[in-house]
Image: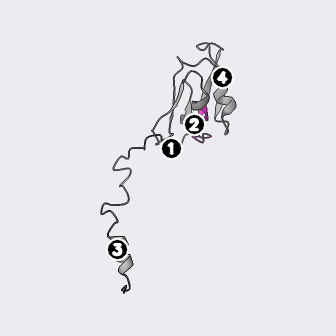
Amino acid sequence: MHYPGALEKELLKHIPKKPATEMYPFVKVEAPEGYRGKIAFDIQKCIGCSLCALNCPSGAIEMVKDDRTKLKKKPKFFYSRCLFCGQCEEVCPRKAIKLTREFELADYDKEKMVIDV
C-alpha cells in the first residue's frame, strides 16, 4: 500500500543538493563546448571569396574592399544582426572564421558591435 506523498519523497531524494543557479555576473560561467559565440576572424587566411556573406541568413556579413586578400575584399561582421548560426564558419574554405565560446557581447553603442579587421 502506498502512502500519500510517498512517491514525491522518492523522487525528491534523487535531486542534487547543489544550487540550480549561479551568481552571474559575480561568478564567471564557462560556456559549454560547441557554444557558438563571438566571431574570431583571421585576415591572413581569408581569400575574399564572399561565401560567408552569401550564406549568412541574417545579412550580418558585408563584403568591403581590402587589398590584403586575394580577391581584394574582406567580410565585415555586424553582431547586432548575427544569429550565431555558424553558417559562415562552415562554408569558409580557408577556415578564416571561427565562432568562439565568448558570449558577453552586449553594448549600448551599435558601432562597437562590428568586426572590421
Q: Which residue is mark 1?
A: 106
- Give the extent of the magenta segment: 77-88
The secondary structure that dominates the magenta segment is loop
The amino acid type, in three-letter code, at marker 3 is Glu
Q: Secondary structure at mark 4?
A: strand
Report which quarter residue 46 is drawn in.
top right
Residue name at image x 58 percent, y 13 percent: 68
Q: What residue sits right under mark 4 in the picture? A: 64
Q: Considering only order in the chain, which callout, 4 or 1, is on the residue closer to the N terminus?
A: 4
Mark 3: which secondary structure?
A: helix
Q: Earlier in the sequence, mark 3 or mark 1?
A: 3
The kind of secondary structure element at disc 2 is loop
Q: Which labelled disc corresponds to residue 86?
A: 2
Q: How is the image coloured?
A: one colour
Label 4, label 3: how many angstroms apart (C-alpha)? 62 Å
Identify the residue under disc 3. Answer: 10
